[in-house]
Image (cartoon, rainbow, N blue to C red):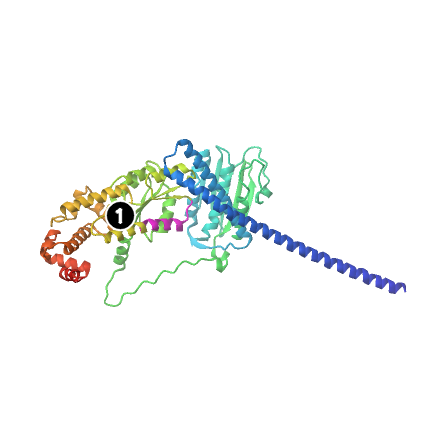
Amino acid sequence: MLLIGGIILGIYFYFKWRWSMKLNLRLKEEETQRLKKLNDFKSNLYTDIAHEFKTPLTLIAGPIEQKLSEGNLSEFDQANFSMVKRNANRMTSLVDQLLELAKLENGKLNLKIAKGNLSLFLHTIAQSFEFQSLQKNIAYSVEIEPLDEVWYDADVIEKITTNLLSNAFKYAPKNGICEFLVKKLYGNVLISISNTVLPGSKIELEKMFARFYQQDTFSEGAGVGLALVKELVNAYHGSIDTTLDADGLIRFTVNLPIERTAFAGYEIVEPTPKPEPVQNSPGISKTKNGSSKDKKEDLPIMLIVEDHDEIRTFVKLALQKKYRILEAENGKIGMEIAFSEVPDIILSDIRMPVKNGIELCNTLKTDERTCHIPILLLTASMGEQDELKGLVSGADDYIKKPFKIAVLEQRIANQIAIRKALRNRYSQEFIIKPKDIAVTPNDELFLNKIQQILDKHLSNPDFGSETFSKLANMSRMQLHRKLMAYTGLSTTAFIRSQRLKQALNLLKTADLTINEIAYTVGFGTPTYFMKCFKKTFKKTPSEYLQSVNNQ
């Protein structure tokens, strides 16, 4: 009986234990699910709130930008509106960081690894902080080893580097030190960023990457940047470490892979394959050098005015397939090249020795030889004063460093497209209409001057490109480049086009013979006039006149 009672009791306690374990396990699973749902809800709430912040921030920044662009504010109002816009931009940056964190948590960040020159890319990012180093008088040193052909995600590395440098300049005291060192080590890149720490600061290294961590209640910022850096480094298959050196420097060291084998196949962005060159058939002689040279000559000319060799090289390598690149290391040299070569577009830094970008822009936009050239200004400054000065000086666009090449390329393409649209408008008109094809008041003055010269001399058969350039007070090349920019035609072709358009108008309205019209518009012989007319309008003057009479 005792044995049977013991067995029954043992079975009872065993099942009771099993039931208790199952209950605890179910409760833990339910708690886990509840916490997961709560975490998802919080994450979605952060994301939704962040998105909601974007609309009012846009509505705040928009009117402020419009007010600043008017340029008739008092010094007091200018300072206040600039402060509002600066803080609106800062809030936008924080919102973007929260959205980026939410994306990482949800596993929606996909690396886009491509082959490129990482050292030049990092130089552009490093240079964008030089303005802040001057403001706080910080000794800012940059050492970047050559990393010509490596695999990296430009967007992720930009976010990591920019956040770490921003953090370094934010907490480094005045007259302090900031170091940015990059070197290659066994298939990886080591990015080391260090800055001086205020004496007596209590820094908890183990909490540096905790979200919303702040050194004290008076610390600036929300503590999101370093948490984002940590998540990005982990997603990049890398590591990050923080140390406090004996000489009073806090150092962040990021270790990231730069070899293709370190990344999954779906993370690699393959370059677009180049089309195979067409092989010439036997008996057809066409030199490669000749065709490639002609193709290069047809490209738009871009002048890059930048005092940093690395930035010039970076932009040149990225855009040299679409533009013929000219380079200048300061504003003075840039102006000389602009006057002599008359490029199609100019990309200029603002802060440069000898003459800065604002002076360059002011000079070129007020000179009739170069007033038509679109100018894009680059700056590392985060203040509004430089941006306002640049826009007032007549700059066509304004880009802050660090910039993405894709964005820069699109903005340049937009400016080229605007000029092409103006050329198309010209081709539809019988006479030049300055107000229709001018971009600036100086453009209008120049085009009015050209129209006056044409009205006076177009009927003269001896009126050619040489006479035209002398009357316009320009060299033949300068006038050629100007007319190409406005109309897409060389000087000779432009004169012929104007004569033919005038002849077309006379055929419709005047009671003159074809020979009389040819002499009236300045053609030396009626035969040459008829040849040019048919080539342009696909009809002889007689056929065109007959078609007009039949309508």
Task: Write down the residue under mark 1.
Answer: 436
Say which of 550 and 105 sits in front.
Answer: 550
Where is residue 146 shown, x and y percent of the image?
A: 42, 48
Q: Residues within 10 Å of mark 1 (few under 14, many from 20)?
A: few
Where is residue 326 shown, x and y percent of the image?
A: 30, 46
Asked which quadrant contains residue 515, the reply is: bottom left
Residue 239 visible in the picture: no
Q: Main secondary structure of the magenta part?
A: helix
Where is residue 66 shown, x and y percent of the image?
A: 40, 41
Range shown magenta = 402-416
The single residue placed furthest to the right in the displayed view is 1
- Name the image quarter holding the C terminus: bottom left
Q: Residue at 86% of width from left, 62% of height from top?
A: 6
Residue 53 visible in the picture: yes
> Quick check: 437 left or right of 453?
right
Say which of 289 and 387 sits in front.
Answer: 387
Q: Residue at 17% of width from left, 47% of height from top?
A: 454
Residue type at numbered disc 1: Asp
- Name the image quarter holding the N terminus: bottom right
Local SS, label 1:
helix
Q: Residue at 56% of width from left, 49% of height from top?
A: 45
Asked which quadrant contains residue 217, the reply is: top right
Q: How many marks?
A: 1
> Quick check: 45 left or right of 112?
right
Where is residue 264 shown, x and y percent of the image?
A: 50, 58
67 part of magenta stretch = no
Say which of 273 and 29 sits in front.
Answer: 29
415 part of magenta stretch = yes
The single residue placed furthest to the front in the displayed view is 551
